[in-house]
């Protein structure tokens, strides 16, 4: 479970930086980037906090 | 490495071998610690001071490298040689009472630094409440809403810091990689907003932004040397000032101090430039040259940017207030840690009510280094010229009085001259940590040459 949350939290980080690069490349609008970054933040903190709440035996 | 673990163990003994840490602990710690709320202010202040783009880029490149070298070759070798905290090491040279005086200076300066971080956080918290943002000309609180939000933010930060910040330190470690990426994303988005296709385009837009920000003029109050010295000495209290003896006493080897490069080039290069581009994008979009971090981050990154400003301010203000509380508690041991940290937090909150501390952050950081860093020279010259790099010499010949007058004189004289030059001659504060450090160290060595000869005999 902890490993799944770890991979998901990386998705959160990717959603923070990749849309900004896609915006530079002209692939996304600014509002879409802001929306993706918001979700990236929610996923990163959600998964990281959930990971820290799980006991080590769950990994 | 948790902050509590660093500061809460082996405070009056050398760190034993089994507690030494590997390099990886330091890389993450420095990358996170230097992605702070104040980074949102410093880059934009370069733009407002009319610094050219190449001077920022090259000045930061060289200055940050010199800062890394200072950690690696001045601070870390003493840290792994003696393995004491700054305060315990200094106590053995300067005496307990003088360390308390040094603590008081440290604590007060920490409070004002935390105040600037509270101001930064408040500008983000105020966005949903349509709070009137303070302008660059506002030295005092500009509205009741700003006062209320600063007081609320400060109260929360002070209460959390006073309750012990182990949880906040964990949250700060968790937030660090995300914050670094938000800084990078903000920089990318701002560059795209500026519609630059080449270096020449960027320079042209940069000059135009300075032109708008300075009300139709282009005058630079900072050149390459100012940026370089600022980048080198904005953390001078930590490296040449030896505050990070407390951190690197846990390092297995002195070369773990190369990890500070993560903090310098991520936090003090990439983040400062990203924040400067954010202000340039805001100026080009609506002509507003006020470097208020909350609205700037909201403009390029939306809610994630606003949360990043709040988190960056909160996670760095908390340990700063906690350290100020620790410094004050050494002077007032009868007060509980909670009370003294809460008082430090309230002092920081009062400082946060005055946006001037945020607008004048460049000068304040230089002043902070000028006052505190010279004490590091005492440790440096004492370690190499008097104790001959032997911890046993430090232990066996520790100063037993309360105030070592030679240390006090060596510290006060150059700092007094520097403060006069800063206040009355108008010379920028970031030029003074180096001459003060050298003068303080040489004076201390001259005053104590006899002891040095006796030890080496």
Image (spheres, coloured by chain):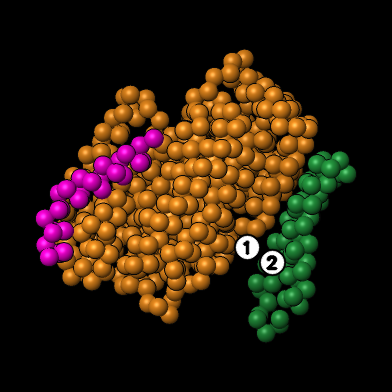
Q: Nearer the viewer, residue B323 or B352?
A: B323
Chain to which mark 1 belongs: B
Q: Are marks 2 and 1 in contact (CB under 8 Å)?
A: yes
**Whole-percent x, y for residue B77 in the image:** 37, 62
Please state the extent of the stretch shown in magenta in the rendering: B431-457
Placement of B198 over or under A3, stated as above or below: above
Give coordinates of residue A23: x percent, y percent. 82, 43
Is-magenta flag for residue B436? yes
Q: In the figure, the orange chain has which letter?
A: B
> For the point 41% across and 47% down, which residue is it?
B236
Q: Outermost residue toward the top?
A: B216
Q: Is residue B249 at least partly visible in the picture?
A: yes
Badge 2 crowding class, 10 Å Cα cut-off, few under 14, some 14 to 19, many 20 or more, is many
Per the rendering, the colour in which chain A appears is green
Circle on res. B292: none
In the figure, residue B426 lies in which quadrant? Answer: top left
- Label 2 sits on residue: A48
Circle 1 — which element?
helix
Q: Give the residue number, with chain letter if any, for mark 1.
A: B174
**To which quarter of the image does residue B275 belong?**
top right
Q: Is residue B166 rendered to the left or right of residue B181?
A: left
- Mark 2 element type: helix
Q: Residue at x 35, y 41 (%)?
A: B434
Viewer-closest of B122 and B105:
B105
């Amino acid at each position: 479970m902890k490993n799944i949350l770890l991979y998901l939290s990386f998705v959160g980080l990717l959603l923070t930086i990749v849309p900004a690069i896609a915006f530079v490349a002209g692939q996304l609008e600014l509002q879409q980037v802001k929306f993706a970054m918001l979700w990236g933040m929610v996923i990163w903190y959600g998964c990281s906090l959930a990971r820290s709440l799980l006991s080590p035996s769950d990994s | 490495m948790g902050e509590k673990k660093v500061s809460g163990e082996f405070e009056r003994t050398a760190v034993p071998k089994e507690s030494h840490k590997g390099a990886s602990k330091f890389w993450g710690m420095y990358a996170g610690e230097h992605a702070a709320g104040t980074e949102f202010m410093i880059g934009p202040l370069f733009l407002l001071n009319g610094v050219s783009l190449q001077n920022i880029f090259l000045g930061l490149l060289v200055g940050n490298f010199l800062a890394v070298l200072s950690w690696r070759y001045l601070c870390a070798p003493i840290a792994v040689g003696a393995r004491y905290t700054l305060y315990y090491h200094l106590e053995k040279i300067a005496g307990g009472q003088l360390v308390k005086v040094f603590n008081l200076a440290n604590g007060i300066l920490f409070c004002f630094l935390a105040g600037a971080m509270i101001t930064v956080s408040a500008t983000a918290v105020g966005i949903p409440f349509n709070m009137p943002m303070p302008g660059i000309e506002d030295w005092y609180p500009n509205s009741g809403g700003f006062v209320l939000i600063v007081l609320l933010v400060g109260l929360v930060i002070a209460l959390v810091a006073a309750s012990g910040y182990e949880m906040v330190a964990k949250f700060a470690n968790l937030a660090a990689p995300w914050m670094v990426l938000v800084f990078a994303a903000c920089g990318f988005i701002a560059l795209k907003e500026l519609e630059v296709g080449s270096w020449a385009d960027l320079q042209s837009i940069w000059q135009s932004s300075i032109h708008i920000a300075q009300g139709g003029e282009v005058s630079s109050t900072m050149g390459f040397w100012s940026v370089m010295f600022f980048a080198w000495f904005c953390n001078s209290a930590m490296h040449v000032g030896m505050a990070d003896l407390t951190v690197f006493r846990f390092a297995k080897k002195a070369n773990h101090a190369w990890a500070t490069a993560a903090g310098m080039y991520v936090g003090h290069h990439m983040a400062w430039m990203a924040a400067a581009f954010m202000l340039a994008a805001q100026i080009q979009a609506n002509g507003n040259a006020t470097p208020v971090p909350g609205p700037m981050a909201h403009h390029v990154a939306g809610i994630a940017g606003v949360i990043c400003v709040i988190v960056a301010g909160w996670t760095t203000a908390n340990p700063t207030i906690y350290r100020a509380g620790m410094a004050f508690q050494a002077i007032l041991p009868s007060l509980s840690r909670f009370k003294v940290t809460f008082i430090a937090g309230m002092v920081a909150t009062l400082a946060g009510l005055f946006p001037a501390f945020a607008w004048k952050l460049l000068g304040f950081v230089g002043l902070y280094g000028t006052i505190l860093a010279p004490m590091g020279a005492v440790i440096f010259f004492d370690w190499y010229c008097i104790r001959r790099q032997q911890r046993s010499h430090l232990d066996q010949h520790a100063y037993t009085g309360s105030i070592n007058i030679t240390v006090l004189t060596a510290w006060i004289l150059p700092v007094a001259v520097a403060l006069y030059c800063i206040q009355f001659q108008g010379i920028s504060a970031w030029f003074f940590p180096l001459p003060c450090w050298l003068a303080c160290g040489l004076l201390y060595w001259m005053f104590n040459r006899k002891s040095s000869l006796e030890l080496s005999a």
